[in-house]
Image: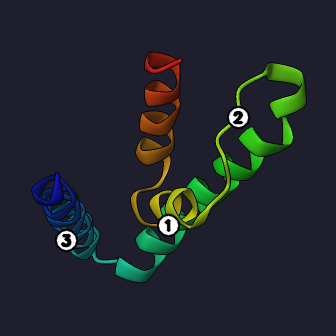
Amino acid sequence: MEILKYLTFAFAGVSAFIIFVFAARSKRIFRTLLFNAFAGICLLALIDLTAKFTGVYIPVNPYTVTGGAVFGIPALCGALLLKFIFI
């Protein structure tokens, strides 16, 4: 089980590096990364604020906030998908 934890961190690190490389290729590194983080955090806040009405809830903790900030909207869509699969 310990190897799974290390593989998860390695995959997250490689994915973050790939995001940085694509942001660097866009010639506007800071703006791209900032927009990605802003979109992810805004979506997490929107999901959290509308949880009473929709019944969809992603717990706000350091992992979801970091995932939303680094990986943006795809990370939160993945968290929602996992929530629906395992409920």
Kindly give the residue lying farthest to the right in the view shown.
52
Instruction: Look at 45% across and 26% down and name the residue there.
Output: 81
Badge 3 local density, few (<14 within 10 Å), some, or many (20+)? Answer: few
Instruction: Look at 48% across and 61% down and name the residue there.
Output: 36
- 34, above or below 61, in the image: below
For label 2, the residue is 57
Q: Amino acid at mark 3?
A: Phe
Q: Amino acid at mark 1?
A: Thr
Apparent side of residue 18 relative to residue 42 in the rendered image (left or right) = left
For label 1, the residue is 66
Task: Out of 51 and 39, give the one closest to the viewer.
Answer: 51
First in residue order: circle 3 vs circle 2: 3
- 12, above or below 56, in the image: below
Q: Are marks 3 and 2 in contact (CB under 8 Å)?
A: no
Kindly give the residue lying farthest to the front in the view shown.
1
The part of the image, by quadrant, that contains residue 28 is bottom left
Which quadrant would the C terminus be assigned to in this image?
top right
Considering the numbered disc 2 on the image, is that residue within a helix, a strand or a loop?
loop
Apparent side of residue 11 relative to residue 62 in the rendered image (left or right) = left
For label 3, the residue is 17
Q: Amino acid at mark 2?
A: Tyr
Q: Which disc, if any, is residue 42?
A: none
Task: Give the spatial CA distance, label 2 vs label 1.
Answer: 17 Å
Task: Give the spatial CA distance, label 3 vs label 2.
Answer: 29 Å
Task: Out of 32 and 57, give the one closest to the viewer.
Answer: 57
Considering the numbered disc 1 on the image, is that residue within a helix, a strand or a loop?
helix
